[in-house]
Image (spheres, rainbow, N blue to C red):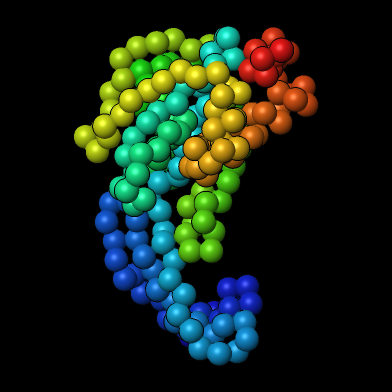
Amino acid sequence: MARKRGPWLVHETRQAYQNPWIAVTEHDVTRPDGKPGVYGVVNFANLAMAILPVFEDGSIMLVGQHRFPQDRYSWEIPEGGGPLADDPLFSARRELKEETGLSAEHWREILRMDLSNSVTDEAAIGYLATGLTRGEAEPEGTEELETRQVPFRAALEDVSKGVISDALTVAMLLRAYYMAQEGELDRALANAMLGR
């Protein structure tokens, strides 16, 4: 029996592929224009996490790694995934520690995003992390990482030049810049981030 999904009519649904991180679901549909079609959706097992660790001097921590799908090196803020059933903050704390060795005393959710929403159901949440303490990183076996501490403004400049192109990193840096400009952050921290 067909069911409505917005302007689409879904006749049949089947799982075309699955691994521990994603599943591909294929839908036989009637498109909004009335013609038959197929719509494939990549379903994610995890919620994407992005953490912007900001030091008292306004600098931030970036993580560098080779990204397999693009076959290139990428500088990003710490990111990862957490099971959909887990507390997102728990997953964010784990990711920050794994990738950078940092722990944070203060956490603030600053962003929620849908990533590539034409073909995936992947959602993301982003946190600003302050009150940082250094420790040993504990990367997963799939990660060969390096870290570097950079001024916030330098990271923003890399976004404007296209050097940093990771979507969550770009969105988080721009959101934090807006917050710093609009008085949504502690004044001393905002001034340090903006180089005032």
Q: Residue at x 63, y 77 (%)?
A: 7
Farthest residue, direction right? 182
Find residue 120 and report its horizontal and vertical position in percent.
47, 59
Closer to the camera in the image, 61 or 42: 61
Left/right of residue 115 with respect to residue 179 in the rendered view? left
Q: Residue 49: in sight, yes or no?
A: yes
Q: Is residue 174 above or below residue 11?
A: above
Closer to the camera in the image, 53 or 81: 53
Q: Residue at x 60, y 89 (%)?
A: 34
Closer to the camera in the image, 154 or 7: 154
Left/right of residue 191 with respect to residue 126 in the rendered view? right
Q: Residue at x 51, y 88 (%)?
A: 36
Which quadrant of the rendered structure holds the C terminus?
Answer: top right
Q: Is residue 123 above or below residue 105?
A: below
Specify the quadrant of the image occupied by residue 27: bottom left
Find residue 194 and report its horizontal and vertical position in percent.
67, 19
Specify the quadrant of the image occupied by residue 130: top right
Q: Residue at x 53, y 41 (%)?
A: 162
Q: Residue 93: in sight, yes or no?
A: no
